[in-house]
Amino acid sequence: MRRWLTMPALPTEAASTPATSEQSEHGLRRQLGLGDLIFAQVLSVVGSAWVGIAAALGHAQTFVWLVSMACFYLPMAVAVYYLNRAMPLEGGLYTWARRGFGDTIGFLVAWNVWTYALLDIATIFSQLPSEFAFMVGRRMAWLPENHAVVLTALMLIVVVMAVAALLGLGLGKWIHNLSSAAMILAFALLIAAPIWVKLHGVPMPYHPVELHLPAATATNLALISQTLIASSGLEYLAILAGETHHPQRNISRSVVLASPIIIAMFVLGTSSVLAFHEYTGTAINFVAPIPQTLMLAFGDHGVGSLLSRLAILLLQIRILGAANFMFAGVTRLPMTAGWDHLVPGWLAHLHPRFRTPSNAILVGAFAVAGLLLLSYAGSHASEAFALLNNASNACYSLAYVAMFLIPIAGAIAIRSQIPRWVKWVMIPGVVAMVFAVCLQAYPFLDVPNPMVFAIKIVLTTLALNALGYGFYRIRNTRRVAVL
């Protein structure tokens, strides 16, 4: 860590002359406007599973959300706002870290974000069977555990996702907008559900905003660490800066305009989940908490059934759109790293017609398919979900540590473009992410052997970073030898 903090004293490629990334961005098509960016921010940050995890904290959920927003979301929003204004370049956080700390840290940040995104796509897809089973009803309760049927369907979805990515953001932005709108509507139904039941005479206690301290238990600490990282994702959109109209202005504005919507969805959505599960005494389904809650609220017959099934369908649309959006980042990170010669140049190849990174799309599709096969190889569905979720969050948390350190200890040329007070806002973010990394290994679900589970998380995170660093060293050594 000490070497990391003292590196930028000052790496010449980090902040001086424009890198090849900017020069190559002219081959991309600028497709995204401000409205697209706001929808994409909501789609990127708000996940359907997080309200279930936060609800497990009980009446302390609002307090924990507020602490999370103060210690992580606010530093993240400030960092994205100012780093994007200083460097509105394709690659986002990768480009910021490379210019702030040099090639090595830049590559490892890209590797961790890329790894997180791949794992997150697999995690997102793992929610589809459970939510589909809730939508259809009891006769499909067997589906989430029938791995053969699930994997066949998911592989077909991966193929469709890859084709959509190849066609580009001209199509992709409409997928993202529709999916984000579906997500907002589903959350609106979730937030309105307590009012619905009260109007129908159900004496269910409902307190949307409560301030209670969480009990000091190991499980609560694990849940808090999950909630800290739940609101992540504001910076992900910056990966597509080279495909955005006026990125310096519009990406920063999207952070400001989307944040109130995001915060309201998290806090009020969690309150609804908590109210229904406390009233009915039902255990929370951490994979599909919103479909489960809506079924409790509206029932499984009549108009209520139609509303709950509609909401579940909306969440299915959101899942597919979120995966498509994450996959866009998965394909652009190798492309921009290829421009900077940190990965093989063929990963930066653009399709002659669609101007999308076709080779990176192919690699990403195979990687997602492989992770899905691995996640269902002999593990219980909920444990597979938790394992993927924790490992991906640990990788992402490490990337966030680097982002928060750029205004504090990054290249002087970058820090000079950022207000001095920003570095003080970054300190809680660094502390929060270090805390989150340390607690990612503890399972918040019941698993047969928590120690084995924790070892899997730690070893997976270490192995992924060792693999990335090893690849970088070998690649860099060969490149220097050729030069």
Image: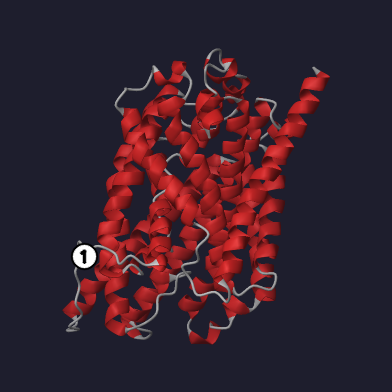
Query: Which residue is pictured at 68% across the width and 44% down the height?
Result: 466
Image color mode? secondary structure
- Where does the image place residue 314, in percent across and percent down from the top left? 43, 64
- Where does the image place residue 187, in percent across and percent down from the top left? 33, 62
Kindly state the secondary structure of the residue where label 1 is placed. loop
Please, is residue 12 above or below residue 360 in the view?
A: above
The image quarter in which residue 431 lies: top left
Query: Which residue is pictured at 59% across the width and 18% down the height?
Result: 13
Given residues 326 and 82, the one toward you in this image is 82
- Where does the image place residue 242, in percent across and percent down from the top left? 52, 29
Query: Which residue is pictured at 49% across the width and 79% down the height?
Result: 136
Given residues 383 and 358, the one toward you in this image is 383
Q: Amino acid at mark 1?
A: Pro
Q: Is residue 268 visible?
A: no
Q: Is residue 196 left or right of residue 440?
A: left
The image quarter in which residue 417 lies: top left
Q: Residues within 10 Å of mark 1 (few under 14, many from 20)?
A: some
- In the picture as drawn, the residue positioned furthest to the front comes out as 2
Please, is residue 365 above or below residue 373 in the view?
A: above
Q: Which residue is mark 1?
A: 208
Q: Is residue 401 visible?
A: yes
- The quarter of the picture where the C terminus appears is top right
